[in-house]
Image (cartoon, rainbow, N blue to C red):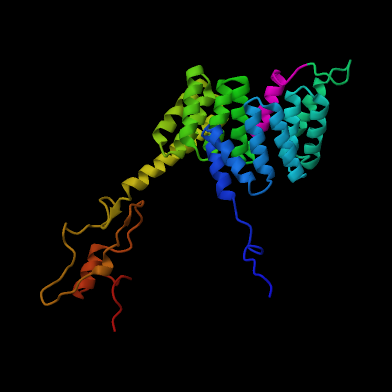
């Protein structure tokens, strides 16, 4: 008799929720907790994404060799995972091994040739090679060109809606290069995109403390405030951005769109103005207030069909009935030439 093994054919457990929880710890700045959570996930098996997350944390903390080991393990787990190759290139560049960094980055470009930031990163690495020795770098990753390249990569990640990766890269840059208004604004925008507007506001407050005239601080903070439904504060920030940079078409467009949204919201909140009787000046004799029916001695005819239904206020239009027509319908008497409103005789 064959022994039953109930777990042998059971589907593998989905660990996506644990991965999201670890990512949230990292985005909140709890790198120690995030590292422990990622390492716990590795107990269920190798995972290229988890290895790259651990490599990012190690790279941020300055553990370049540890980061390189994690990225290498990510590539071993999934040879087509582009961020594993790119991580190896970043770690090798920080270690001064430019030739290795070029080779790893070239592999990443081969996997995703349309990703412009990877191509530019590879071009920057090639330009750093010293022509005399062929291997030593003339400038390390602290150069302005290297910094701008990482900025462009963060922008591309955000444009592709990979906000978690963008937050990771920008947080690493902040730890390595220090805070600046531009870096903090990009980090705040990525946090807003990842659904963390309150943390984004902290970044924008830090950026404003460094420079009160950096216009994109107000633009980014307006987006975070809009995500929190604080539209009046967002409009105030866009007004200040427009004052600092009045010729910017993107700022004017965002400001106009928000102003229009606020006007529409105010109109909806106040509700439509209803009219149950024609307004004065519409060319119609309105009945006395409170009079809902008309009758004559011996009759009790009501005229609901002659009363216009309640509807939102609209521009006046030519009258198609008159008060005399109403009287004739209610009493059955003719007050002049036959009108189209008069009921047909049987």
Image vertical order of residue 342 relative to residue 156, above or below:
below
Image vertical order of residue 244 relative to residue 264, above or below:
above
Percent position of residue 259, x then y: 44, 36
Image vertical order of residue 142 relative to residue 168, above or below:
above
Residue 91 in the magenta stretch? The answer is no
Which residue is at the front of the view, 318 or 73? 73
- Corner quadrant of residue 346: bottom left
Q: Is residue 250 left or right of residue 99?
A: left
Image vertical order of residue 244 relative to residue 303, above or below:
above
Q: Is residue 274 left or right of residue 262?
A: left
- What residue span does the magenta drawing correspond to? 139-155
Residue 141 in the magenta stretch? The answer is yes
Q: Can residue 51 be seen from the camera position used here? A: yes
Percent position of residue 47, x then y: 68, 45
Q: Residue at x 47, y 19 (%)?
A: 209
Q: Can residue 82 be seen from the camera position used here? A: no
Percent position of residue 59, x then y: 66, 29
């Amino acid at each position: 008799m064959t022994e039953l093994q109930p777990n042998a054919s059971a589907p593998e457990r989905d660990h996506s929720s644990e991965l999201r929880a670890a990512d949230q710890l990292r985005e909140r700045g709890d790198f120690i907790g995030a590292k422990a959570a990622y390492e716990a996930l590795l107990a269920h098996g190798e995972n290229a994404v988890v290895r790259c997350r651990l490599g990012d944390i190690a790279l941020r903390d300055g553990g370049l060799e540890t980061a390189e080991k994690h990225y290498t393990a990510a590539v071993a787990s999934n040879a087509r995972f582009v961020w594993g190759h790119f991580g190896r290139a970043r770690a090798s560049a920080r270690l001064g091994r430019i030739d290795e960094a070029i080779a790893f980055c070239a592999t990443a470009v081969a996997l995703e040739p349309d990703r412009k930031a990877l191509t530019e990163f590879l071009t920057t690495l090639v330009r750093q090679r010293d022509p005399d020795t062929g291997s030593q770098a003339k400038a390390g990753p602290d150069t302005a060109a290297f910094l701008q390249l990482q900025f462009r990569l963060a922008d591309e990640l955000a444009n592709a809606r990979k906000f978690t990766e963008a937050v990771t890269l920008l947080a690493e840059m902040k730890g390595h290069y220090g805070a600046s208004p531009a870096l903090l604004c990009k980090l705040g925008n990525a946090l807003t995109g990842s659904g963390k507007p309150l943390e984004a506001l902290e970044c924008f407050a830090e950026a404003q403390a460094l420079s009160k005239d950096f216009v994109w601080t107000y633009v980014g903070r307006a987006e975070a405030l809009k995500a929190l439904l604080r539209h009046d504060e967002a409009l105030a920030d866009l007004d200040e951005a427009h004052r600092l940079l009045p010729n910017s078409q993107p700022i004017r467009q965002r400001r106009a769109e928000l102003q229009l949204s606020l006007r529409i919201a105010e109109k909806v909140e106040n509700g439509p103005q209803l009219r149950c009787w024609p307004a004065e000046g519409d060319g119609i004799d309105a009945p006395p207030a409170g009079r809902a029916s008309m009758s004559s001695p011996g009759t009790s005819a009501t005229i609901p069909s002659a009363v216009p239904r309640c509807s939102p206020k609209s521009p006046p239009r030519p009258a198609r009935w008159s008060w005399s027509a109403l009287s004739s319908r209610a009493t059955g008497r003719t007050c002049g030439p036959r009108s189209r409103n008069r009921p047909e005789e049987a």
